[in-house]
Amino acid sequence: MESEMLTESHMQSNFNTLLIHGGIDGDERTGAVSVPIYQTSTYRQIELGQHKGYEYSRTGNPTREALEALINQLEGGEAGFAFASGMAAITAVLLLLKSGDRVIISNNVYGGTFRVLDKVFKNFGLEYEIADTSNIDEVESKVVPGVAAVIVESPANPLLTITDIGKVAGIARKNRALTIVDNTFMTPYLQRPLELGADIVIHSATKYLGGHSDVIAGLVVVKDSETAARLKFLQNATGGVLPPFDSWLLLRGIKTLAVRLDRHIENSRHVVDFLKNHEGVTKIYYPGLEVSEGYEIHKKQAYGPGAMISFVLSEDYDIKLFFKNVSLITLGESLGGVESLVSHPASMTHASIPYEIRQKVGIVDNLIRLSVGIEDKEAIINDLGNAFNKAKRK
């Protein structure tokens, strides 16, 4: 099913309430409004062969299950699963495939996804091929019988490339391939891939869902019961589950997702206005710019532009001095926290991707990725301005 134009009223109708009360709301036994942290490894059984629904916390834990129920409801799926990291989540999903299968990945996919395919799964006979998934003709030419899955990011990391998720899903479905969407940048507040036709949604919940740079986690939502049963088995068998305390942190973080993202986006638009008029910027990547490639597709399938911005620094500026002179903005890995973060994709998030591929797709050495936080927007602009001033070559 191809996506239809999405409206602001549709986005807001129930979602803000679901963020607070979705999944398992509070604790029925005690009346606690917050789901308790069930910090236990095992459970007392009633008698041999009879228990209260829990045997061992790798297999099932009430705090983790509350989180899994919540993300499933937010994405509109059949079942949700919580893992110890985004990469653990991606790994579990790839384990649904078998030796000899071929996977199509976006040409500027997250470096960790590329690395695990290229350095780990390739050893077990799982093949991959890189494609420009924003080019539907190229997708049609590469998604053929024998391809088991297409992995898409939209917007993609770090060039914010837009892929028409509905069209890719339609092509994949015709060829009996799974459509797997990394929805980390958007979250279900801004985009719901399962509604657009995807089969599986992955999140690095470390980012916007947690929102406070204090937890490492991965979430997966699937839309059919057969895949859910297989992934449940893999989650238990391989054991990369999210601990109870981290599950609770995510439950707490998700409650404020809407108000945080609204502020993130407001600040981002302000930052984009500053950057697009600055002599130190030769190119800017942001889905909210009407001149950006894929703008109309993104507007059709998402509820907002998000808060990730990438830009190319002019050769008249020293990139090392730019990074050295940010102060309020933190130079560091990751994204999606309340604080603004800046990174260098070529040497950080995408360093595992070969140089030739990086250059070809546009992940050049003077590309900067900015995760706009929720600080005062003028303070963010002032910090960027100072970094530009200090980095200008004499």
Image (spheres, grey):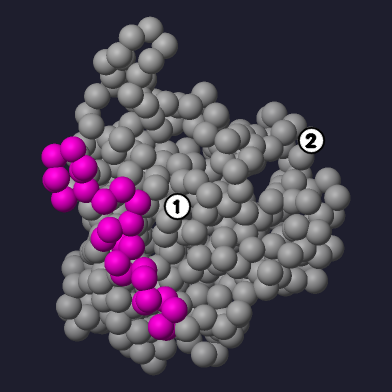
Give the residue at mark 2: 100
Q: Toward which corner of the image does residue 376 lie, by quadrant?
A: bottom left
**Which residue is depicted at the point 31% across and 69% down?**
16
Residue 72 vs residue 296, the one in the foreground: 72
Q: Quick one: SS at disc 1?
A: helix
**Which residue is depicted at the point 30% across and 54% down?**
210
Judged by depth in the image, the label closer to the viewer, 2 or 1, is: 1
Residue 63 vs residue 138, the one in the foreground: 63
Q: Position of residue 120 (x, y in %)?
A: 61, 33
**Which residue is depicted at the point 78% across and 51% down?**
176
User: Is residue 254 placed above or below 137 in the rendered structure?
Assistant: above
Q: Position of residue 331 (x, y in %)?
A: 29, 60
Q: Quick one: SS at disc 2?
A: loop
Q: Is residue 74 visible?
A: yes
Residue 357 vs residue 265, the one in the foreground: 265
Give the residue at mark 1: 72
Q: Amino acid at mark 2?
A: Gly
Q: Quick check: 141 left or right of 329?
A: right
Q: Toward which corner of the image does residue 139 lie, by quadrant?
A: bottom right
Please tell me which of labels 2 and 1 falls first in the chain. 1
Q: Position of residue 135 (x, y in %)?
A: 72, 72
Highlighted range, magenta: 8-33
Q: Quick check: 327 left or right of 345?
A: left
Q: Is residue 366 visible?
A: no
Q: Quick check: 211 left or right of 229?
A: left
**Which residue is depicted at the point 60% across and 43% down?**
225
